[in-house]
């Protein structure tokens, strides 16, 4: 599966790329750069991890978000990214439908939209119940 993702994006399959993508896939709620470096310590150097992360972002394989703790987390990109994020428990929920799809078929302020990510922040129903 991992090799297929790389091949679909026309990226050469290498040990570091496979291992980094594997680590990201193992964390469906996202992983930080610090966690990746710690997990790969001794097998992949830090600068390679940074370069691979940059490559994966530029090729649309992963997305990066800043959570409520101001940590950058990386997630496998699904569809074109529509998320709800709870600012209390940091739960990330992916939306099934695009709330602005009908608006992006046209140019906006002179831009032809190629890709978009929507992230809405709020408080999930569970955290609202626990509010005291």
Image: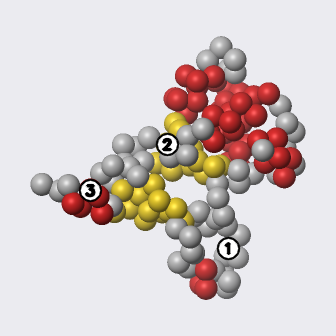
Secondary structure beneath label 2:
strand
| Residue 35 left/right relative to 1 | left
Q: Position of residue 106 (x, y in %)?
A: 67, 85
**How is colour applied across the structure in the image?**
secondary structure
Q: Is residue 1 above or below residue 34?
A: below
Residue 127 image label? 3
Q: Is residue 56 above or below residue 103?
A: above
Q: Position of residue 73 (x, y in %)?
A: 51, 43
Instruction: Name the quarter where the N terminus is drawn.
Output: top right
Which residue is disc 2 drawn over?
72
- Label whose residue precedes the other's in the sequence (3 or 1): 1
Q: In this orientation, does residue 127 appear?
A: yes
Question: At 70% from the left edge and 50% from the top edge, which residue is drawn?
Answer: 61
Residue 113 image label? 1
Q: Which of marks 2 and 1 is in front?
A: 2
Q: How much space separates mark 2 and mark 1, taking CA atoms?
A: 25 Å
- Characterize the local packing of mark 3: few (<14), some (14-19) or many (20 or more) Cα atoms within 10 angstroms: some
Q: Which of 22 and 100 is in front in this view?
A: 22
Question: At 84% from the left edge and 52% from the top edge, which residue is drawn?
Answer: 8
Secondary structure beneath label 3:
helix
Question: At 73% from the left edge and 43% from the top edge, which residue is drawn?
Answer: 55
Q: Which of marks 3 and 1 is in front?
A: 3
Q: In this orientation, does residue 6 appear?
A: no
Q: How much space separates mark 3 and mark 1, taking CA atoms?
A: 35 Å
């Amino acid at each position: 599966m991992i090799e297929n993702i790389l091949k679909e994006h026309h990226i050469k399959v290498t040990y570091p790329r496979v291992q980094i993508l594997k680590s990201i896939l193992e964390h469906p709620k996202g992983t930080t750069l610090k966690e990746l470096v710690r997990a790969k310590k001794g097998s992949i150097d830090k600068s390679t991890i940074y370069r691979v992360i940059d490559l994966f972002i530029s090729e649309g394989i992963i997305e990066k978000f800043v959570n409520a703790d101001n940590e950058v987390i990386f997630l496998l990109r699904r569809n074109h990214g529509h998320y709800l994020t709870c600012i209390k428990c940091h739960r990330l929920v992916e939306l099934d439908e695009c709330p602005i799809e009908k608006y992006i078929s046209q140019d906006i302020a002179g831009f032809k939209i190629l890709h978009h990510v929507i992230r809405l922040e709020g408080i999930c129903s569970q955290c609202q119940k626990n509010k005291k």
